């Protein structure tokens, strides 16, 4: 996979902007809740510079492993691109003029032509500047410069298009990993995965506890706390797999229930004023890589959603 360095720099800048925005919101939440609750434990805020450095290291690791190849934009193309901008030829138009898009196209097309590459794939959601009206082919003006590309709007679009070919070439994954009952037993026996599920679920409950407590103890001006008594794995649904030569990616949704004891405490007298037992129903969106030797690698939790609380007024979050 080849990626223009302009695309990488744009990715890093968007990452920085988005993370900075989220950090600002998180710091505001910590400050506002801290003013209300003396016992509040602040949510850990990521360090922007550290995370930017982690992203840079991740990209460099992909390059070292040859998962991606960075193509450097040629500064000598400036006047050629400037002429396109003046004449409003693709990827420029009368209404749009993204200079970086022209640099990206020039970098890819010249590399392909120079190395006489065929059957290449161009991945971009920017159909307006790069594709024809039907968004099925490279724009005719750009095809005059390089006609070796087949366009796709995303990796998902690409995989779906060639799914049958992938299945024929990489259909080695055992069917047991697609069986919900077998898969849940495999995952729950893995200590690292089990601990990750409990930790992430606990964090999600912690993030939602103020809304839950407000519903349970309306109008009572004291402090709250809680204990997670247990976490039960119920079932796995929506299992999908993507097979590759040396590994597969398995995705699914794990449904769990968590028994929670919430109590209201007067911290001046250390007196427990009230307590309630509830049960949270939670969906956990996950995926992991598995090798041909059945080694589970890189288990990731993409999203956690508390679907509802039962046992006391059936709170819906």
Image: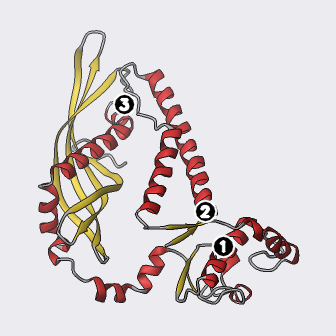
**Mark 1 or mark 3, earlier in chain:** 1
Residue 201 versus residue 78: which sits nearer the camera?
78
Residue 280 visible (yes or no):
no
Question: Dot 3: few (<14), some (14–19), or many (≥20) neighbours within 10 Å?
Answer: few
Q: Residue at x 21, y 52 (%)?
A: 193
Local SS, label 3: loop
Q: Which mark is residue 107?
A: 1
70 left or right, relative to 41: right
Q: Residue furthest right?
A: 86
Among the 4 quarters of the image, the one containing residue 269: top left
132 left or right, relative to 48: right
Among the 4 quarters of the image, the one containing residue 168: bottom left
Q: Residue 12, relative to residue 71: is it above or below?
A: above
Residue 192 versus residue 253: which sits nearer the camera?
192
Local SS, label 2: helix
**Residue holding disc 3:** 218
Question: Dot 1: few (<14), some (14–19), or many (≥20) neighbours within 10 Å?
Answer: many
Image marks 2 and 1: residues in contact by CB distance under 8 Å: yes
**Residue holding disc 2:** 5
| Residue 55 coordinates in the image, percent (x, y) | 48, 51
Q: Which mark is residue 36?
A: none
**Mark 2 or mark 1, earlier in chain:** 2
| Residue 150 coordinates in the image, percent (x, y) | 56, 86
| Residue 300 coordinates in the image, percent (x, y) | 32, 56
Q: Residue at x 74, y 65 (%)?
A: 75
């Amino acid at each position: 996979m080849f990626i223009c360095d302009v695309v990488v720099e744009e990715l890093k800048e968007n990452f920085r902007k988005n993370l900075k925005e989220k950090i600002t919101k998180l710091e505001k939440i910590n400050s506002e809740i801290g003013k209300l609750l003396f016992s509040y434990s602040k949510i850990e805020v990521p360090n922007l510079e550290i995370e930017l450095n982690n992203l840079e290291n991740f990209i460099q690791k992909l390059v070292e492993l040859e998962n991606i190849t960075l193509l450097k934009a040629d500064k000598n193309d400036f006047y050629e691109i400037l002429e396109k901008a003046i004449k409003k030829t693709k990827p420029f138009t009368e209404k749009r003029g993204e200079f970086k898009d022209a640099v990206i196209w020039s970098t890819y097309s010249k590399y392909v032509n120079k190395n006489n590459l065929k059957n290449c794939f161009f991945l971009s959601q920017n159909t307006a500047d790069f594709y024809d009206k039907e968004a099925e082919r490279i724009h005719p003006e750009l095809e005059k410069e390089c006609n070796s590309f087949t366009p796709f709007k995303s990796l998902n679009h690409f995989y779906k298009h060639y799914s049958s070919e992938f299945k024929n070439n990489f259909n080695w994954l055992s069917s047991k990993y697609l069986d919900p009952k077998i898969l849940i037993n495999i995952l729950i026996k893995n200590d690292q995965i089990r601990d990750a599920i409990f930790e992430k679920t606990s964090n999600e409950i912690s993030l939602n506890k103020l809304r839950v407590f407000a519903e349970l103890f309306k109008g009572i001006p004291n402090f709250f706390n809680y204990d997670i008594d247990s976490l039960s794995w119920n079932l796995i649904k929506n299992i999908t797999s993507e097979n590759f030569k040396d590994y597969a990616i398995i995705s699914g949704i794990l449904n769990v229930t968590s028994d929670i004891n919430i109590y209201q405490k007067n911290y001046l007298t250390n007196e427990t004023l009230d307590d309630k037992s509830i049960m949270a129903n939670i969906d956990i969106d996950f995926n992991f890589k598995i090798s041909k030797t059945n080694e589970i690698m890189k288990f990731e939790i993409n999203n956690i959603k508390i679907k509802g609380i039962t046992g006391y007024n059936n709170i819906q979050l």
